[in-house]
Amino acid sequence: MMNLMSVRSLGSFTSMLLMLCFSFISMGQNKDVPIEQLPLKVRITFDKLGPIDEVVYQEAIAKMDEGLKLAGLSAEGTYSQLVFFITGKLLNSNVGIAANSSYVLNYKLTYGLMDLALNQVIKFDSRTVEVEARNETFAYSAMVENFAADRDEMINMIQEAKNLLMTEYETNCQVVIEKTNELKSRNQEMEALAFMRCAPIFSPNCSDMLKQNATMIYQEYTTKECPVITDRVKNAVSNNHDDLILTEVRNLAYLGSCSENEKEVEALLQAKKKDQAIAELKKIQKAVKAEEKLDYPLDPKIQRISVISVEMSRMVEMQDIEKINELVPR
């Protein structure tokens, strides 16, 4: 049986940031976001002797999700940096000899709130509980009932932890900017932009500082990236690879800062009679212009061009569990 919580290396910082960037609340909102509206990821894991019944496992997740929603806490932002974790560590289990014997689980329940962006557990609690039932499945079901019974206590803890988190973000704006600039110095512009979007709430002054910093980094990034993508479009056209042409045209147009390159590409597409690609280019150009009217037009651009793998959901599931194992105190 594996240790409940093992402190290990944080692993790929880039993977964590890419995992996070899809769900952050826009920094463009210069008003406070109510605590109860912050997205929250619920993660339930069990450390046990055998595989938990899948139905029971899903029931556990559903019950906690329902409980949090009933308490006014949103669990909709599936991939948030705020993770409410529940882990059960099986301490021992015994099954009697008689036909009517019970299955006894003595387990340690740990739960709390962690923040992946700040790389820390904000608050946690732990206790030991014994559950008795006629088989393992019913015993785990009883564990689920314990989760439900502790809901109010957990909700209070989450509220307190979120308030602490908001205070930390509001008073440490400069720390976020310094970490962002460190990433930028390593030519990790996309990761830097994603990191600036990690905090779910900022004071207006901090938000303005981050907007300015993000705009500068984005401009530097597109200055390097626009000609690179343009060359890829040219290569796709020379190979008459229509699907690849569409992909690279989208990539170029979505940057929203490559007007000269877009003109060059459009002329090439017209010469080669690539009508579908031209239509796609113009459609995206129109959408990008509409975004310029937004309070913080970089938001949708960053979301689109961040490197999101088709395996993202699977990676996120793995990362959440790993981060909890690394960060939660024993």
Image (cartoon, helix red, strand yellow):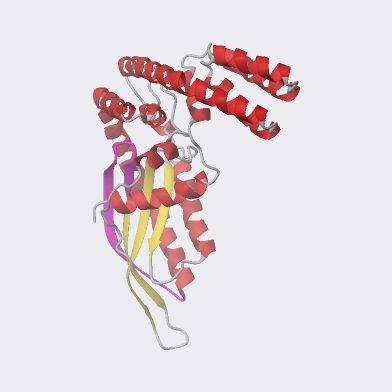
159 displayed left or right of 43: left
Span of residues in magenta: 111-135
Residue at 39% x, 61% y is: 46
Q: Is residue 21 visible?
A: yes
Q: Is residue 290 visible?
A: no
Whether 24 is drawn above or below 27: the answer is below
Q: Answer with the quarter of the image where residue 184 lies.
A: top left
Expressed as whole percent of the image width and height from the top left, the position of residue 56 reads 50, 62
- Number of labels in the image equals 0
Expressed as whole percent of the image width and height from the top left, the position of residue 62 reads 51, 52
Whether 246 is drawn above or below 328: the answer is above
Q: Nearer the viewer, residue 181 or 30?
A: 181
123 displayed left or right of 234: left
Residue at 48% x, 32% y is: 306
Quarter of the image where the C terminus is located: bottom left
Expressed as whole percent of the image width and height from the top left, the position of residue 221 reads 42, 22
Q: Answer with the quarter of the image where residue 208 lies.
A: top left
Please, what is the dominant secondary structure of the magenta stretch?
strand
Q: Nearer the viewer, residue 227 or 220?
A: 227
209 displayed left or right of 77: left
